[in-house]
Amino acid sequence: MKVGVISDTHIPKKTKELPKFVLDTFQGIDSIIHAGDIMTIDVIYQLNEIAPVTAVAGNNDSVHLHEILGSKKILDIGNFRIGITHGHG
């Protein structure tokens, strides 16, 4: 199983959309982890078109995204258990 990991996309503050190289790199993977600072749920929708996404909110995300995503998750993939958090503070 191939897992892509991304964080701090800061869209649309830092850039208007996910860079093409990110989308190209993630082609063919089985799962995506986004570790926060998403800033718009549209990023999750876009990544979800490539592979299922597990995401947590970061310190720059809205209260609404924190309510939807939470700030910490445990993900079991195959024989691995992965803790996901943004890591701020």
Image (spheres, helix red, strand yellow):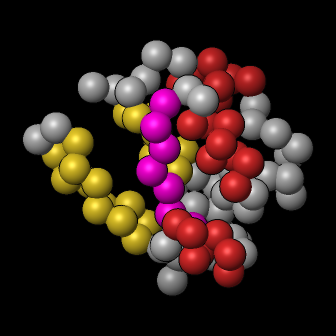
Which region shows up in magenta?
Answer: 51-58
Quadrant of the snapshot with the N terminus: top left
In the rendered image, the residue lying farthest to the left is 79
Q: Is residue 54 magenta?
A: yes
Can you give x and y, in whole percent of width and height, for residue 29 in the image? 43, 23
- Placement of 7 over or under 73, stated as above or below: above
Towards the viewer: 45 or 59: 45
Magenta stretch prevailing secondary structure: loop
Q: Is residue 70 left or right of residue 60?
A: left
Give the residue drawn at x 49%, y 73%: 70
Towards the viewer: 80 or 66: 66
Q: Is residue 27 magenta?
A: no
Give the residue drawn at x 65%, y 25%: 23
Give the residue drawn at x 46%, y 16%: 28
- Placement of 35 over or under 6, stated as above or below: below
Q: Is residue 73 left or right of residue 53?
A: left
Q: Quadrant of residue 37?
A: bottom right
Give the residue drawn at x 64%, y 70%: 65
